[in-house]
Amino acid sequence: MSLMDKTARNVAEKVRRGELSAVTVLEDAFERISAVDGRPGALDYGEISDEDKSKVHAFITLTKDRAYQQAQDVDRSVSEGEDPGPLAGVPITVKDIFCIKGTPSTAASRILANFVAPYTATPVERLEAAGAITLGKVNLDEFTYGSSSESSAFQPATRNPWHTDYVPGGSSGGSAAAVAAGEGLLSIGTDTGGSIRQPAAFCGVVGLKPTYGRVSRYGLIAFGSSLDCPGPVARNVGDAALMLSVMAGEDRRDSTAATLPVPDYLSSLDKDVRGLRIGISPDYMRIPYPDLQTGEVVVADLPKEIRDAILNAAQALADQGAEIVENVPMPNMSYGIPTYFVISRVEAASNLHRFDGVKYGYRTQSEFSDLREMYRKTRAEGFGLQPKLRILMGMYVSAAQYSEQYYQRALKVRSKIRSDFEAAFDPQGAYRLDALLTPTTPTTAFKLGDVYGDTVLMQYADQLTVPANHAGIPAISIPGGISSEGLPIGIQFQAPDYREDTLFQVGNAFEQATDDADWRKIKPQVMKFVE
Amino acid sequence: MTDYETVIGLETHIQLNTTTKIFCSCKADSWEQPPNTNICPVCSGLPGVLPVLNEAAVHKGALLAAAMHSEIRLTSHFDRKNYFYPDLPKGYQISQYDMALGNGGYMDLPMPDGSVRRVHIEKLHLEEDAGKTKYEDGRRFVDFNRCGVPLVEMVTGPDLRSADEAAQYLIRLRQLLRWLGVSEADMEKGHLRCDANVSIRPVGYTGLNPKSEIKNVNSIEAVRAAINKEVERQIELVESGGSVESWTLDWDDAQQRLTKMRSKETIADYRYFREPDLLPLELSEDWRDGVLAELPELPLERRARFKRDYELPEYDADILTGDRPLSDYYESAVEAYGGDPKIVSNWIMNEILRMLNELGVSADKLVLLPEHLAEVIKMVDKGTINNATGKSVLAKVQESGKAPGDIVAEEGLAQVSDDSALQAAIDKVLAASPEELASYRGGKEGLFGWFMGQVMRETKGKADPGVTRELLGKALKGE
Ligand SMILES: [Zn+2]
């Protein structure tokens, strides 16, 4: 059995005890990568071959030399009796939206293709300081704008390891796919509207969006600054807990990072769920979305398989002694997407201003007669479709004459959405929930090309995840079953501010309860390349 | 011809003299540093970096707000002002928009005729500076050193009525900034920058006419000259049947000329929104009380008190409150002296100011302490030394650090007022100058001063002038 099929905790423990060398672990990781990944994403990618269509393509940049150097450092510190850290020797991948010193940090965009960061993002720095070995930078939707990872300027785009005709979700598609295929045991992603949880659900892995501010954003190339959360992608809840305990905490370089102490998340894994109140909301079991022809908003029930996964999970937890609270109203959650459209795009358009061809990154190669033309050409050539759409809409809704009716209004709705959660979690309220159990996504993974290009419809893939971003609360997606098509189904737990420990507690209990379920025995399609 | 009234509002940018920049740990001051050598990922707008607010900038900003009688808001917000320019590396400036640190405020400006002009403050907020753009050989060069330097932007209401008043406001503001120690306020170095909004209206009309905005006025003289030029232009224009349009004008100091930069028909939309990378700026009431408690007596208040309590003429009071160390020096000297404050004022305005000018330092840096000055004045009062000796003793104290009494004793500078010694000196002078004596006695009484000088020389300047005058008069008359 490859070390890539073990848990991160197990591998780290063995490396720490000197029973396993970090270099050996690394060799297994690169072996797995060469078996399943295919060629990394590139700007000049030529034809997409049938061979390409069968591989994962999680990576944009592999940092092999750097990884071996790190692994040797870990092995040396073990042999010298030093503490190599809680993630000693654990191979990880990093979404290419985080800066790592001396490494290309592209945001999957042509405009940053040549940008080599002169500093390392805080959460990555912490993971590496804890002994984690960075294998490389993984693909994503350009600037994280999307839910399928197809919009990357670096093609071939990442594919779903469970079935390579399907998208891995996004924007942290590379992270989720890499973890699902065992190319690295953990990955660091970002979640602005569901960008960790949705791909985690599509790829059958665990993805956590921490409380806003729990993990520093320093070094994360910003999308929606008031919504962005770096978080762990792992194959099981325990590994996610270990990873968060390393990444989280205050940072003097990010004043929005919380100064609260980081609890011992691993200890919450030992707690059972007896007496915990876990809610289910009918508002999360159906979704309103705009009809493509008429534009009218229609309400549809979620697919039965997905609703069943929630009911099964509720049953499993009830069997463990949790109290299931039904019919929790979340009346404002249906405004999540329109609100997100406005807020995230206003922030995104502003965050993209700095990519102007003046200081770093791409500058137009063609002639220009003045500054304006240089800006226009650079940005027209450097940005792909998704950033352009976000710039246009963000500029529009934040214009002085529209700001009141869009942006300012969206901020008010955002606080309404938060108040839904406050009511559900209020210890003196009617529901007194410890966690809210919902599906992560309205559907399982869709096929490549199916939704792409329709920004609106694509966005509705985030319908069930985006309320947590508005509210700032933590939410986790964990595998909850496999559909009849053989695609993973994710279930989501949401908890009050800074109660990631509850999410780990509940998630772990669910994992234990379904440990020998039949669906857990199904493996991703690309594992056929691993003998 | 109609009589016109000038209406002026000033927009000032004040560079706070913090050690580091407002959102990163680069040095705030990069004066004369080569371009782009005082920058970091944060102030040069690299992807993924975040601003962290420098508390010292908030403190200095709040102190200024308090001095401008502005309400220090306990909760204020930073906002993004979005626009594209090469020297603005993030493509937005972090500023404060609708909920700024300061709310309202005013400065009461004393006018030469004794009246007071209240200048209202419409905006007072913290923001970061942008970089500098330079054009050379048809190329554009950008220097980010200045990016992130903490600024207070302060905008007055349209309350000033002449170029002189505008200049007065800037002079008083500069004095205040230095007084508070929040800015070096050196206009040449761009620590205090000013744009002037100028319009005219017929006297009696209270509405506001279209205004022009004059940029790049970097000295008090430039402000005065540019406004006068612009008022002249507007009056001529209106008199000849034209109407003033909202233009932005650039002041060319070398040519003493205004040139049109652009029309301002459309207002730029900066798409302001709250800066999500910074938390709201929350100040406690204790903190605010602390700032208010720290606020010193302000220059104009002190000026009024000097006039009232020390009965100083306006001229003296104005000069003695020109800067804070000088006015503190004066007060300490008055206290140590205990006599007529005007006498102390005279000594400072003559002797001490000259000394400060020559040494190029402020009064708090003198070796010659206010107590030394008081001691010297007292010795002169008592007749221990004469005025001229007093002045030279001041210089000697400054040089040696010794107490004035010691210097007078050591060097035997005490005044000769003993009649017999003086009489001997006078007799000697008269004996040595028979011709002059004859002339004097023949009616050339103008020679009296020459004899005084001779006696002073004989006594090495120590002769008491009063006693000498009396004795010499008698001797010359042969009495
Ligand atoms: Zn800096």
Image (tube, coloured by chain):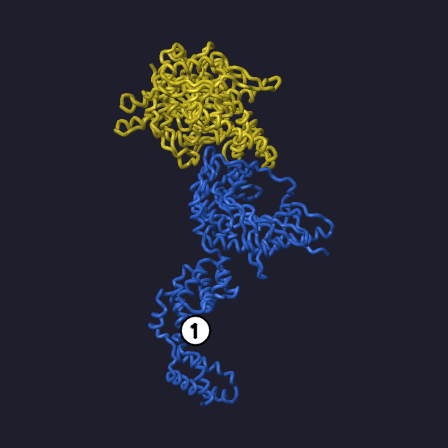
Q: Is residue B407 above or below residue A68?
A: below
The residue wearing badge 1 is B387
Chain ID for blue: B
Q: Is residue A104 above or below residue A290?
A: below
Secondary structure beneath dot 1 equals: helix
Coordinates of residue B262 in the picture (x, y in percent): 64, 43
Q: Quadrant of the N terminus of chain B?
A: bottom right
For label 1, the crowd category at 10 Å Cα-Cα, with few meaning under 14, some 14 to 19 and many 20 or more, is: some
Q: Nearer the viewer, residue B140 or A235?
A: A235
Coordinates of residue B284 in the picture (x, y in percent): 43, 43
Asked if residue A404 lies left or right of residue B466, the reply is right
Location of residue A214 by image quarter: top left
* Amino acid type assigned to the residue bearing label 1 in the image: Asn
Residue at the extreme right of the image, as rendered: B241
Q: Chain of mark 1?
A: B
Q: Quadrant of the C terminus of chain B?
A: bottom left
Q: Colour of chain A?
A: yellow
- Can residue B239 be seen here? The reply is yes
Coordinates of residue A158 in the picture (x, y in percent): 47, 19
Asked if residue B313 lies left or right of residue B458, the reply is right
Coordinates of residue A147 in the picture (x, y in percent): 50, 21
